[in-house]
Amino acid sequence: MSDPLHDRDSAEATLRQVYAAAVPYLATLADRPVHDPATESLLVELAELADGGRLPEKGVGSVAAMERLLRVGTTVATHSAGPRFFHFVVGGATPAALAADWTTALLDQNAAFRATSPLAAAVETIALRWLRELFGLPASYGGALVTSATFANFTSLGVATHWWAEQHDVDVAADGLTGLPRMPVLSGGYLHASSRKALQMLGHGRDTVEVYARDRVGRADLPAIERRLAELAGPAVLIANAGEVNAGHFDPIDTLADIAERYGAWLHVDGAFGLFAALSPRTADLVRGVERADSIACDAHKWLNVPYESGFAFLREPSRLPAAFGMPGTTYLPGPASPLWSDGSGGPVGSRPSSARSVQPEVPAGPVDYAMHGPESSRRARSIPIWATLAAYGRDGHRAMVERQLDLAQRLARLVDEAPDLERLAEVPLCIVCFRARPPHLPAGELDDLNRRLGAALLDDGRVFAGTTVYDGRIALRPAIVNWQTTEADIDLLVEVVRELVAQLAPPPG
């Protein structure tokens, strides 16, 4: 096979192959081990289409290629979309989101401009509005869909950079950071590495953040933050963290909002998964004050359970997005030099909105050119799975999912507390349970080594996945429960496997 044009008649057959593989895969996903390292030997088959693993001169055709990919992929893949993957904070894909993601690939829209896809632009506008309503944010907030929480932090802190530069009468979009002082960025100790990475990519440096924590866990030292803002006596950026990754802790967002208002600071909330606390009356107080933030970052491929890659950023003043991310116009792209130009914000692309804190522009009523609202130009229509899962299950369905997982986290905490060889290290405000193995016969000085080996053994075992972290100076596990399929049986299996491995790694004497 030398030309895809000659392979057109295979399209139906290859799509049927995917469907035929997907049905049994999805039917058995809940019962599969998360990963079997012994299967990795099959990976060599993906390079064996030609001698030496080189790119073949003549392809084998789509049917043969897909047969191999599906056979190897469904066997070797980490089954992270299933209910027993507790590593990191990873959701799955609801049935509606999965089907919509297939539809997204089928339609293959470039969601950059209304001109490239009126469908994608309209669906993104609806999806953003529904997300805003899901979290109870004011109607004036607008946003952008991006690939991840890292890029949501990048987008939010990018806009914050432009706001900060305005206070120094500098247009960063035109002139860059040259001549400006270092942008002050303050946070408590729950700061996530993705915020540092965003600042690194923005040219501020990953170590620019001043961290004020009152203990090794990372609880924010609020008096110290306030003293520092008073010393600065100028514009600064304050990062609040909603859902710390080791135990699910929250900064006091409402109090930090008060502090930001007193000192004229920009308040950014990193709510990668913690923003979903807003969905349940049981946890809504954890994010009280988020509606006062200047910017908010969140992931959709975590607790919303849509496929990778999907995140979003919300801005209190959405007209700042095109000011930060608008492109210089050309004759073929929407921009000042093109008749297609419109950024949907009521002003020219790259124009600076008023820096007055009281200005809260209305969100555009219709679709906008979303390439002007975020870092990407060519953009996949990632709004379609978000729209589909929200349309399919609504507010009530997503609240039920969150509350079920809150219950499962409490079940896990209870099982840990009841086990004589396990020790919980933190309260469980949301969906992460931080605990470690602590056999009664083992000296305290050997516990870190045991738990380090336990984390590696869990991943090698593969029946469930949960990784290690350092919490309050101690090596621990921190399973996160955000998958829509996870049940009590999966939680019970996690504890059973952990205790089985502990017994193997540190058998009692005698």
Image (cartoon, grey):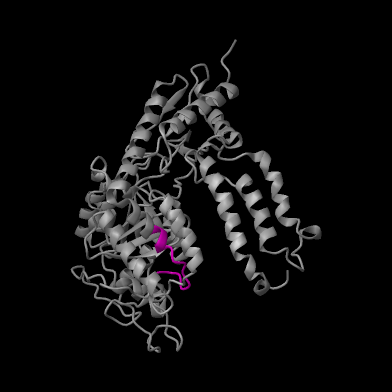
Please tell me which residue lies in front, 143 or 289: 143
In the displayed orientation, state which residue is furthest to the top. 510
Residue located 43% across and 74% down the image: 112
Please tell me which residue lies in front, 389 or 180: 389
- Does the rendering let one see residue 154? no
Q: Residue 197 location, x and y as percent?
A: 46, 58
Q: Residue 400 location, x and y as percent?
A: 31, 42
Q: Residue 103 location, x and y as percent?
A: 47, 62
Residue located 74% across and 64% down the image: 55
Where does the N terminus fall, quadrant-wise? bottom right
Where does the C terminus fall, quadrant-wise? top right
Seen in the picture, residue 3 relative to 403 is either above or below; the reply is below
Horizontally, residue 493 falls left or right of residue 272, namely right
- Does the rendering let one see residue 32? yes
Seen in the picture, residue 426 relative to 310 is either above or below; the reply is above
Picture quadrant of residue 480: top left
- Whether residue 352 is in magenta: the answer is no
Horizontally, residue 9 falls left or right of residue 346, namely right
- The range drawn in magenta is 374-386
Q: Residue 258 location, x and y as percent?
A: 20, 54
Residue located 76% across and 65% down the image: 56
Please tell me which residue lies in front, 190 or 422: 422
Seen in the picture, residue 145 relative to 489 is either above or below; the reply is below
